[in-house]
Image (cartoon, rainbow, N blue to C red):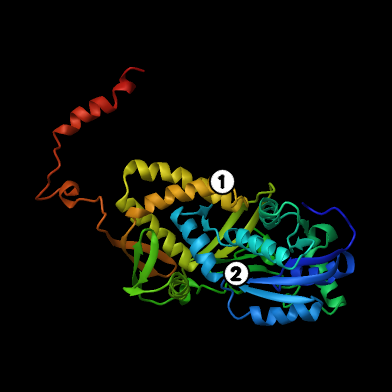
Amino acid sequence: MISTNKSKYKKVILAYSGGLDTSVAIHWLLENRAQKVIALAIDLGQGDELGPIQKKALKIGASESLVIDAKKEFVNEYIWPALFANAIYGDYPLATALARPLIAKLLVQTAKTKKADAIAHGCTGKGNDQVRFDVSTMALAPHLKIIAPAREWKMTREKSIEYAKKHNIPISIKKKSPYSVDLNLWGRSVECGILEDAWKEPPEDAYALTKNQKLAPAKPAYITIGFKNGVPITLNGKKLDGLKLIQRLNQIAGNHGIGRIDQIENRVVGIKSREVYESPAAVVLLKAHKDLESLTNTRETIIFKSFLDQKYAQLIYDGRWFNPLRKAIDEFNKYVQKRVTGIIRLKLFKGSVTIVGRKSSFSLYKHKLATYGKGDLFDQSAAEGFIKIFGLDLKSI
């Protein structure tokens, strides 16, 4: 239940990222809505920043500052199902949106453990994440109150920075570079500041995971990715668990400038925004996976699945992960993935990723049927009769 009650709650669990909005939120909640605030940060592959932000939350005033390592759960229960669904919204892999239902689930679990009255997040009233957190919480724990300080205080980003300075809240953001950044294993999203001008090219300081194409290696890199039942299990012939494979592939592909995406986005709330994304590993894995699916599954399966893939991405983007339809599509995808076993060979070069080879014991590609050269077994004489029947309805119009 979204909170409209202005009285203070005894205990609130705040989804804490350490950024401007959630840092300001700790102080604001204690001033206005909560007797105690417990900061909860979820480790989804952000790197070394979690230790410092855990201390930062306590310094600002949180009674407790918790960090939950959810990287493996994120990979196995969220990233791989999204990979099976080739989940892309517009032109970019869903990273931030994919993480939100997991964070919401852990917020709810922590609220129950700590006997909290409400949960809170740092989302504004014009973004997508408020929808994702609120809808997920409503699905999992409809009795919990939801507080969104940024929706209530209606401060501009500049005013939030001033509020932080006034109350000695440590922030790394500056008015001249007020980026809002979200990072996890599957990608990095950047907005605000100069990026709000849709005409201007994103400056290099907006990027952190990928090299400028001009500075990328002068020679291409060739890599192989091995899949078993749709899950990537090897990189260049070496078996790796999902977490290490994604981390290593982020480094390799990022070094070659792969994964930069600049997009005008259609938000859930009805406005358009300009977003910049970096998703090195996700871009490579999604391309490889989709190609292997095409090699190993029938035409009818691929066509039908493409509609489900689009719907799956929309469900993630809209914050409807806990919709029964998503679970039903997962079951369909698990069946399809039984054939998605094989190896894909890719070429990485100055921002581009190209598939240059593929093989599978489940391959439906037959050289003797596809070739135009010696050894062709395709009966071309049968084509004329097939075409007459196939187009018969059109002759009757």
- Label 1 belongs to which residue? 324
Q: Which mark is on residue 183?
A: 2
Q: Residues within 10 Å of mark 1 (few under 14, many from 20)?
A: few
The answer to whether 301 is drawn above or below residue 86 in the figure is above
Front residue of 95 and 35: 35
Residue at 32 percent of width and 54 percent of height: 339
Residue at horizontal 27%, vertical 59%? 360
As drawn, is 148 to the left or to the right of 322? right
Pick the front one: 112 or 198? 112
Q: Which quadrant is home to the C terminus?
A: top left
- Is residue 70 toward the left or the right of residue 112 in the image? left
- Is disc 2 in contact with disc 1, using a CB cutoff of under 8 Å? no
369 to the left or right of 192: left
Q: Amino acid at mark 1?
A: Pro
Between the residue at mark 2 and the residue at mark 1, the CA separation in whole angstroms equals: 28 Å
Measuring from the top left, give residue 136's x and y in whole percent.
66, 54
